Amino acid sequence: MKAMVLRRTCDLEHDKTPLGLRDIPTPTPANGEILVRVSVCGVCHTELDEIEGRTPPPRFPVVLGHQVVGVVDKTTRGTSRFKTGDRVGVAWIYSACGTCRFCREGRENLCPQFKATGRDADGGYAEWMTVPEAFAHPVPKVFTDVEAAPLLCAGAVGYRALKLAGMKDGQNLGLTGFGASGHLVLKLARHRYPRSSVFVFARSAKEREFARTLGAAWVGDTADESPEKLDCIIDTTPVWKPVVDALGNLSAGGRLVINAIRKEDVDKSCLLGLDYSRHLWLEKEIKSVANVERRDVIEFLELAAEIPIKPEVQEYRLEDANQALVELKERKIRGAKVLKVRP
Ligand SMILES: [Zn+2]
Ligand SMILES: [Zn+2]
């Protein structure tokens, strides 16, 4: 089968073609797994973290991609939820042990055996993939494949971030960074918290304009001071300075949720600018979002279908995955990037 394969970690600044188009064997599903004929796969910022070694895959070559939509091509002994031809989505959570303390408490996203799709197991930048049936999700009919893909990660993890922010209707929400996740969270927040105002901090004028069209009450640069203090802020930027700036904009008792699997080191020195009285005093909280649970994916898909939330999407061919990744790195963003695996 055709796949875009990562052979080693590298610096995207210098190597703009980290993935190679290869013909590799179509995977065979083990018992309890299904074989998925992939239709589309979303492109996520986490892929940049994998390629550049901040969260490196444990083995190479590996097929990236964890926002996968396709149809079930083969079931196996031990599967029963899906039948051949059913449409399914696969998200970042590929499997968890099911028996550890975290899994038993319903926090499978924190499982020490957590396996990520497209990092610890081959993902969706390919024509076929296998996945444990219990970790595949039905996709609501209202979405096309391309629309559904970004909901599986950017949407689901954004939904989790919003849950962790502990928002109440009427409280002000800040979003620092406005990529694939930010724009879905804005739509979700406007629906769930109609009396709240959303303040968007984004580096590029295009992103700010986009946020405005989606109903942001105020837009500015990530370094700007907001016109009023904010109760919750969600950070989706890859660096540190927006974190410090966001803490300055947070109200007393406010919470900053950092939605990033890793931060880049380029501006780590900004953390020395943290001033306790200005940035942390008065019970300000910082919390990170780690992975997703299956229920985040399922709940968000249902909610997105009901509202409905349809993401703004930019399409690429599978062969052009490198271009999509480089554009993501260079922050040429409007909505979410999706690879069409089959023409
Ligand atoms: Zn992702
Ligand atoms: Zn576990």
Image (spheres, rainbow, N blue to C red):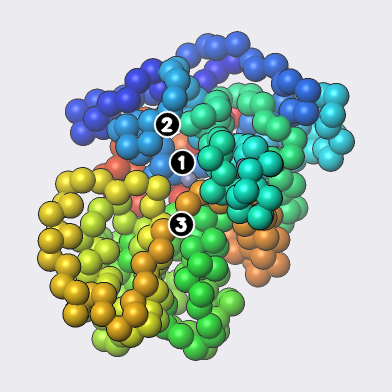
First reached walking from the N terminus: tag 2 or tag 3: 3
Height in image: 36 above or below 286? above
Q: Can I make out residue 301 in this image?
A: no
First reached walking from the N terminus: tag 1 or tag 2: 1
Image location of residue 56, percent across then percent down: 38, 31
Name which residue lies at 29% across and 49% down: 263
Neighbour tally class for label 1: few under 14, some 14-19, many 20 plus, Cα within 10 Å = many
Amino acid at pointer 2? Ala
Which disc is residue 110 wearing?
none
Q: Describe the element under mark 3 as helix, strand or loop.
A: loop
Q: Describe the element under mark 2 as helix, strand or loop.
A: helix
Say which of marks 1 and 2 sits in front.
1
Instruction: Give the residue number, with chain letter if any, for mark 3.
Output: 289
Tell me: 84 left or right of 20.
right
Which disc is residue 43 wearing?
1
Q: Quadrant of the C terminus?
A: top right
Tell me: 232 left or right of 9.
right
Amino acid at pointer 3? Val
Name which residue lies at 26% across and 32% down: 12
Name which residue lies at 62% across and 39% down: 96
Q: Can I make out residue 322 in this image?
A: yes
Instruction: Give the residue number, with chain letter if any, for mark 2.
Output: 321
**Front residue (pair 150, 145):** 150
Q: Are marks 2 and 3 in contact (CB under 8 Å)?
A: no
Image quarter where ligand 2 lies: top right
**Front residue (pair 322, 102):** 102
Q: Is the C-beta of the residue carrying label 1 under 8 Å from the nearest atom of ligand 1?
A: no
Q: Describe the element under mark 1 as helix, strand or loop.
A: strand
